[in-house]
Image (spheres, helix red, strand yellow):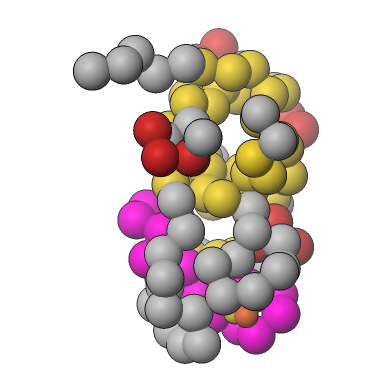
Amino acid sequence: MRMATWVEVGRIEDVPPGHAARVEIDSVPLAIFNLDGEFYCLDDTCSHAEASLSDGDLDTSRCAIECPLHGSAFSLQTGDPLSLPAVEPVRVHQIDTTDGVIRIALSEDAR
Ligand code: FES
């Protein structure tokens, strides 16, 4: 099994609670979310059409992000769509915030 490659993308202060940030690793656009101090990372591009999930609204009660274009909600934990029109999941990537530094490891299938 290949070891995960961790890439430093910023500091936790860059993404306050309730906010999102968009970063790129190897030209893959990624969205980082801070849900009340818990950090998550998903593909930034919606699985339904060309929309940036980091521009969407966080749904704390469902631990989800709502796409800004047509409103599908995606689970921050699994990337699965929780509502239509999206039916395909987005990928979830590992994220680590040790010592206040945000590091991401792309999922194997993201390259
Ligand atoms: S582009 Fe995201 S739900 Fe349509």
Q: What residue do we see at 64% from left, 40% from top? A: 28
Which of the 4 quarters of the picture holds residue 66? bottom right
Looking at this view, is 63 or 17 the one in front?
63
Quadrant in the rendering for residue 47: bottom right
**Which residue: 38% across, 33% down?**
108
The percent position of residue 65, horizontal first and vertical second, equals 55, 65
Which residues lie in the magenta part?
66-80
Taking the image as shown, residue 91 lies to the left or right of residue 11, namely left
| Ligand 1 found in image quarter | bottom right
In this view, the residue farthest toward the front is 111
Count the labels in the image.
0
Q: Position of residue 5 (x, y in %)?
A: 47, 16
Closest to the observer: 27 or 36? 27
x%, y% of residue 30? 63, 44
> Which residue is at 71% across, 23% downward?
10
Q: Is residue 9 within the magenta segment? A: no
- In the image, residue 14 above or below residue 87: above
Taking the view exactly as shown, the residue that stands out farthest to the left is 1
Q: Residue at x 69, y 50 (%)?
A: 20
Verify whether residue 74 appears in magenta: yes
Residue 49 location, x and y as percent?
Answer: 65, 74
- Overall secondary structure of the magenta stretch? loop
Whether residue 51 is situated above or below residue 71 in the rendered picture: above
Position of 97 with respect to 80 (left or right) is right
Can you see residue 15? no
Determine if residue 45 is in view.
yes
Q: Quadrant of the N terminus?
A: top left
